Amino acid sequence: MTQPPISARADAARPETPKPDGTSRRRRIIGLTVVGLLFVGWCVTVGLPTDPVLASIWLWVLTIGWNNGRHWTHHLRFLRDWLPVLVFLVLYSYSRGWAYTSTTVPHVYEMLTIDRALFGVIPTVWLQQHLYDPNHIYPWDVGVSFVYFSHFLTVYIVAAVLWLRNRAAWGAFMRRWMLLTFAGVSTYILWPAAPPWWAAKYGLIEPVARLSSRGFNAIGLHGAGNMLNHAQLGANPVAAMPSLHFAFSLCVAGFFMTRLRKRWIPLLALYPLAMAFTLSYCGEHHVTDMIVGALYVLASFVLVSVGERLWRRRRARRAAATAPIDAARLDPAGGASVGSVDGVPTDGASGAAVDPDQAVEAIDVGPVGSRVEPIGVGSAERRDGETAAQRPGGTEPAAGATSTAEPEAAGAPVSGPPARG
């Protein structure tokens, strides 16, 4: 009887190796299954987690299920990194009391005027006159309910996935999102504005129904609809300008448009477009609110990008100013050394300034006590001409070994026995 190849037998007997994060595929599937069953049970008995803090807790549970093979201290890092976010979300939930009181008179005529100037009609009124039937639920009624509800989860799910895969990208995303949210909440407090359903309630426009939770009833998710209605009752009724619903969807899409291939851009653009239709059709926001929300997204991305660049340059200058520079390590052919003037790295031969963003990447920090060699100006020539004693670590050739390196200059003393005539 023929035996299978040895390599095939070895592969068949090889056990499943865990992932680099310490969680095997089997453990990951089991962990996600358990978390999924717990989440479904919660939604059926309690309702959908629309509260931001509760949603963040569920995301923590999801990360535990994903990396259930990691040590428990790893899971505590989630709380450490997300604690400022949770504090920020708690303050965000209290903003309703700061922005809306019994004496608040919200702005609404300004948005109605701009919408009429742009479209000739109020978009919410026109859409409901053509698409809404109080006696029948259409497929788009179900779709808009899911799109509207995604606002409460999408940002946090994206943030959790980024935290698991790339903490630096997670930090970049959260900085933009937190600045955007802070600017929106500040506007609600300083300039409260009312949505279309509020304007219709007080007779400022034609009758408008609030449709955001209507589609859930058509597919039997009465608990989800009730949970969403409860969340809307506790929401800020004068938080129309800017539309953070639209701004958050655009923030997610815009963040990945610069990080994914171009073929994904049309798919990413569908989410904010679907959110814009949902908000207008359901009477939640004016088109003007969404335009201002888009401007807030653009401003937050620009400001954070500028701040990140300034921070990198500052770190580069500090690293260049504190890094030890060996002035004796010159190009063997009389080349340049790297120095600094007023903390700015320069080319020692020409005196030209070196880009700090490149300088911070150019510093190769070795073990403690080792020499630090700037890689950049003249580095290739120095490596070609360095002797064994100048190699990293300063190691000398072993006893009896033959060195082919030439002296650095004519007449320089060379160690070893005298040449025989």
Image: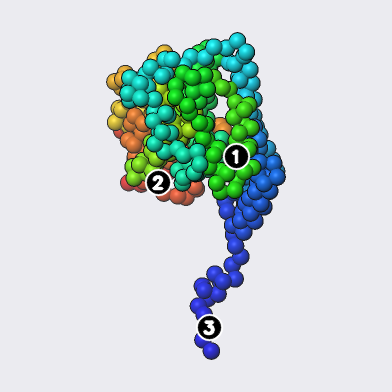
For disc 3, the marked residue is 3
Residue positioned most to the front: 135
Q: Residues within 10 Å of mark 2 (few under 14, many from 20)?
A: few
For disc 1, the marked residue is 225
For disc 2, the marked residue is 403
The image quarter containing residue 328 is top left
- Tell which circle, 2 or 1, labels the residue nearer the N-terminal end: 1
Callout in the foreground (3, 1): 1
The residue at 39%/36% (across/down) is 130
- Percent position of residue 131, x then y: 41, 38
73 over 174 or under it: above or below: below
Callout in the foreground (2, 1): 1
365 over 92 or under it: above or below: below
Q: Are marks 3 and 1 in contact (CB under 8 Å)?
A: no
Which element is circle 1 on? Answer: helix
Q: Residues within 10 Å of mark 3 (few under 14, many from 20)?
A: few
Estimate the spatial distance between the alpha carbons at disc 2 and disc 1, rounded to whole Å.
Answer: 81 Å
Which element is circle 2 on? Answer: loop
Estimate the spatial distance between the alpha carbons at disc 3 and disc 1, rounded to whole Å.
Answer: 63 Å
- Tell which circle, 2 or 3, labels the residue nearer the N-terminal end: 3
Q: Residues within 10 Å of mark 1 (few under 14, many from 20)?
A: many
- Percent position of residue 111, x then y: 42, 18
354 over 149 or under it: above or below: above
408 over 26 or under it: above or below: above
**Looking at this view, is 24 or 227 the one in front?**
227
Residue type at numbered disc 3: Gln
The residue at 36%/33% (across/down) is 379
